[in-house]
Amino acid sequence: MSYEKISTKVLSAIFATGVLSFCGVAGETAMNITFPILMKEFSVTTSTVQWVTTVYLLVVACVVPLSAYLKRSFKMKSIFLVANLLSVLGVLIDFIAPNFGFVVLGRLVQGMGVGFALPLMFNIILERVPSRKIGLMMGVGTLITAVAPAIGPTVGGLLTAHFGWRSIFLVQFPILLASLIAGLRSIEQKSEVKRESFDILSLFAIIFLFLGLILGLHGMADHAFLSFSVLGWLVLGILGLVLLVWRSMKLENPIINLAILKNGRLTGHIVAFFTLQLGSLGMSFILPNYVQLVNHSNTTLAALMILPGALIGAGFAPFSGIILDKMGARKPILIGASLIVLAQLLFTLFGLSLSNTLILVFYMIFMTGLGVAFGNIMTNGQKQLPLDQRADANAIFNTLQQFAGAVGTTLASLIVALSQINHKIDFAQATAQGSRNGFRVLLVLAVFQLIVLVSVVKKND
């Protein structure tokens, strides 16, 4: 088994589900670069426009926890078909959106599709790929979730500059059609399907958890902490978490098995993974806006500043998986995490006077670290568990990845927005100060992530 080749059908199935995820994730960050345009066209503020990204990530975070239950209860091809059709519908809504509300609605619908597709891709890899090549294919899979956020602004900027922001959704139609054809031809059912009862209380707990925490964080931009718009929503989120943990411990077959978090090394990997994704999405919000609002560059140049780093991250993602398969996890993970700390330190030190050239160089360092570490953290974390528990671990990783993205975008926009309301200095200078504050927070998180990884990634992994 360990020396078997990966079949063409398995590769096609990974491609089909991966394309769905790629379109959603890349489209999510492609819209970040259009924020100044959307703010002007629809007359909305910085804290409002970021809902284009936040609502997408929020919906994905609510759907992904259901993936372990869906895998046990429904055929993979059926899950894929629903995911694809939802993605197509979401793209269509965004393409024809007459107002800002419809833009957000389209992101919500596509987020549901991606929420089904993303864990499905990793479940296919874990179930169908020979163990000797899992590191490589997990690297390819995480390339989508790690690099698509960086490629998104580049593609979004170029499309917006030449064809308008709606073209971001138009180009996805033929891609999603190719995904549909490939998936229906190649996705096969190997594991047994047995319909389980669905715990509606757990679903409400998941919704309360992520809705409460995201709305609470979002409300900090415009409301006092002790108001219902902040503290009230945060309390709802905490209650949702308590309810979810209680149901998980009480039920014989919970929607998501949180008992696996008793494994300390797995939990450490998850915490580091969450922190890394939070920083990645925070950067994808701050940098395009810095290039446009502080350096007064157009969307095309803002996109090109991010492209080299995105390509480097894309190149390292599968390569780092090969390193893990041959040399173990510790070296690539710790090297990648260290590079991320270095990049965040440089962004912090030069935060008030970042030229486009410095942004280009520093982001290349950041994306190198991301490409080397990101997928291997997820792969090595799941290796801490037996095979029958990895679907639950996969659900937790992917859920927290999306939630971290929502928190990262919300946190970054909040920090920048708080500085932008300072009318004693001009808008560009205020944006630079807010960006530097954001870099400082992300630096602290990067250092924390490195410390956690040093403690949980062992030489024999």
Image: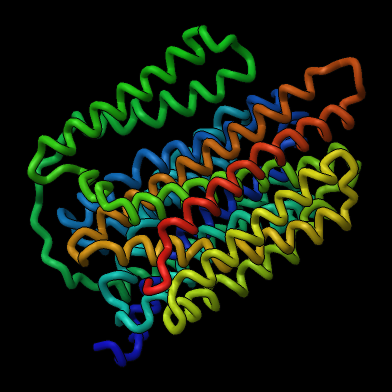
**Figure quadrant of residue 294:** top right
Where is residue 144? Give x, y as percent.
Answer: 52, 63
- In this picture, residue 446 sits left or right of residue 42: left
* Residue 257 appears in the picture as rendered: yes
In the current view of this chain or complex, which residue is farthest to the top?
Answer: 227
Task: Please tell me which residue is depicted at 25% across the width and 47% down the height of the picture.
Answer: 262
Q: Nearer the viewer, residue 369 or 291?
A: 369
Where is residue 208? Give x, y as percent.
Answer: 34, 26
Task: Please tell me which residue is depicted at 49% across the width and 23% down the height of the picture.
Answer: 215
Q: Nearer the viewer, residue 15 or 266?
A: 266
Q: Quadrant of the N terminus?
A: bottom left
Would you place residue 77 above or below residue 169 in this image? Answer: below
Where is residue 239? Give x, y as percent.
Answer: 31, 22
Q: Nearer the viewer, residue 316 or 291?
A: 316
- In this picture, residue 139 sits left or right of residue 32: left
Task: Please tell me which residue is depicted at 36% across the width and 61% down the height of the picture.
Answer: 381
* Residue 304 appears in the picture as rendered: no
Q: Quadrant of the C terminus?
A: bottom left
- In this picture, residue 134 sits left or right of residue 202: right
- Count of number-bearing discs: 0
Q: Nearer the viewer, residue 119 or 161?
A: 119
Would you place residue 299 above or below residue 12 in this image? Answer: above
The colour scheme used here is rainbow
- In this picture, residue 193 sits left or right of residue 368: left
Where is residue 47? Give x, y as percent.
Answer: 65, 25
Task: Please tell me which residue is depicted at 87% across the width and 38% down the height of the picture.
Answer: 352
